[in-house]
Amino acid sequence: MNQETDCPSATGELRMRVESLPFAEIPGQSKLFLDYLSDPLSLTRFYPNAVRSHTDLADRIATVLERQEVDRGRLCDILVEQNTKFGAGAAAFDNIDLLRKSGTVAVLTGQQAGLFTGPLYTIYKALSAVKAAACLRSRGFDAVPVFWAATEDHDFEEVSVATIAGDDGGLQDVSYVPAAYVEKQPVGEVVLDESAGGAIDELLSFLPPTEFSETARDLLKASYTDRATYGTAFARLISRIFAPYGLIVVDPLDAGLKRLASPIYKQAITDSAEIVDAIIERGVELKADGYHTQVEVAPDYFPLFWHDDEGRRVALKKGSDGKIHAAGSKAVFTIAELEQIAMQSPESFSPGVMLRPVVQDYLFPTVCYFGGGAEIAYFAQNSEAYRILDRPVTPILHRQSFTIVEARFGRNLEKLGLEFTDLFRDLDSLRSEVVARVIDPNTAMLFADVEEKINAQLHRLDETLSAFDGPLASSFANRRRKIIYHIAATRSKFERERLRSDEVIDRRLRSATTNLLPRGHLQERSLNVAQYLDRYGEYFIDWVYNSIDLDDSGHRIVYL
């Protein structure tokens, strides 16, 4: 499927071409993910409220509104306070006001608080939620987009690096770990220091100066300020990037939000054993159907984490004594004690991955959640937590997925005679293709001709020896494989050296693979939005938004 669209830019209208690539043609996708994309209704055993299309979400609104229990006024007061701190735009506050209405639903998404927003798919998640909310409103339903910043997570190593493709064509990783960081501390509570500005300068130093560079620098530095927390900095940047789109950003570390969530915490504690047994059984069912389990849940699993006096987020485990133990400490609780804490000091808890969606959807009237392939797999398991806690299971939709092909990389592919899908092949195969098509087709043809003729003659000799002497034929078969191997190795070495001798072609190939498939993975899983804000300013966000097609479940390739 090909589309073309005109989008505004600093120099007038920009014509963009968009192609859709089925995920089944992209290596490394799980069977569960592909089957869900193909026909979600065939998997209602694991996804009870799956919808075939985003247009079917309206059918769920009545149920969602009926089961909304949290005081909207209190919830929205907290959102106003948070989004004021984040520097959100007027459109976000308009949406918070809309959420106060009893008939409004929320389209949720979320992501860990990655450095400078983390990988590009964070941006694509947010835009997917914005688009879906806008679609519902266009059909007469009140809906708002909400971004859940996963500030409670404690895997700091995973969020402390931002990656860009530098102007020299190589990948650059910029890491930032504040001096005050405490291991296992929730990432949202990690306090920044003055060296955050140095990390921003380092990041932008790898990019060529443009008319948007200073604006990008100011945006990052206004968000990542000395003494701010990682969570606040992340939320500030998300809020500023999406100011025109009215995205409501939520920090779940907020004590007020945890008080609102305390009833579902308490219920999860009460029903913890049943939740764990059900999730374990669901894992067995998934594997029996040929699928994988995203999270291996052991019998000692507990659905909540404990925040200790040192500010660490530690796992709770069920011991052989029937009590709940905080990992790495001497703290031990009974279920009754944890229930009491949940009601009196809910800030002592945060939900694990199997419970977090239930907590989100308890707080918000969630009509759907936009997630990636891994989250779709999570939902196949944690739908059991919804069932045990008697909550309506929220349908998950796959976020929009993009590869951005800037004009220069599009030209590089064209000059190399390659399509985007060619980049999924191994490097030797790709190198051979480029040499054969662009650099030295005559020698490539000569190798192919020689290999064909030698193979034919060796096959003739093999047939003769096989009829004459079995052991001799077996020995020759081994030698024949070595001969073929050495010819192929010589061809591969020639291709490498021939490509290396043509620096322009070599640079084009490296540049294309680095930017379009960095480290062998989809661009959106590695690269940070900063390089596109530096190059194109706010127009980049608008271009991606205009390229969204919620009816398309494929990977969308956008040619600028």
Image: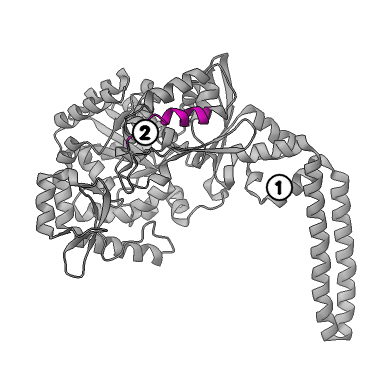
Q: Which residue is mark 1?
A: 430
Q: Position of residue 296 (x, y in %)?
A: 36, 61
Q: Is residue 85 above or below residue 412?
A: above
Chief SS of the magenta region: helix
Q: Would you say 79 lies left or right of 297 here? A: left
Residue 198 colored in magenta in the image: yes
Q: Classify residue 243 by image quadrant.
A: top left
Q: Position of residue 505 (x, y in %)?
A: 76, 37
Q: Nearer the viewer, residue 209 or 281?
A: 209
Q: Which residue is mark 2?
A: 129
Q: Nearer the viewer, residue 416 or 513?
A: 513
The residue positioned 46% from the left and 29% from the top of the image is 198
Callout 1: SS? helix
Report the amino acid beneath label 2: Ala
The residue positioned 24% from the left and 42% from the top of the image is 361
The residue positioned 83% from the left and 73% from the top of the image is 479
- Residue 69: numbered disc: none
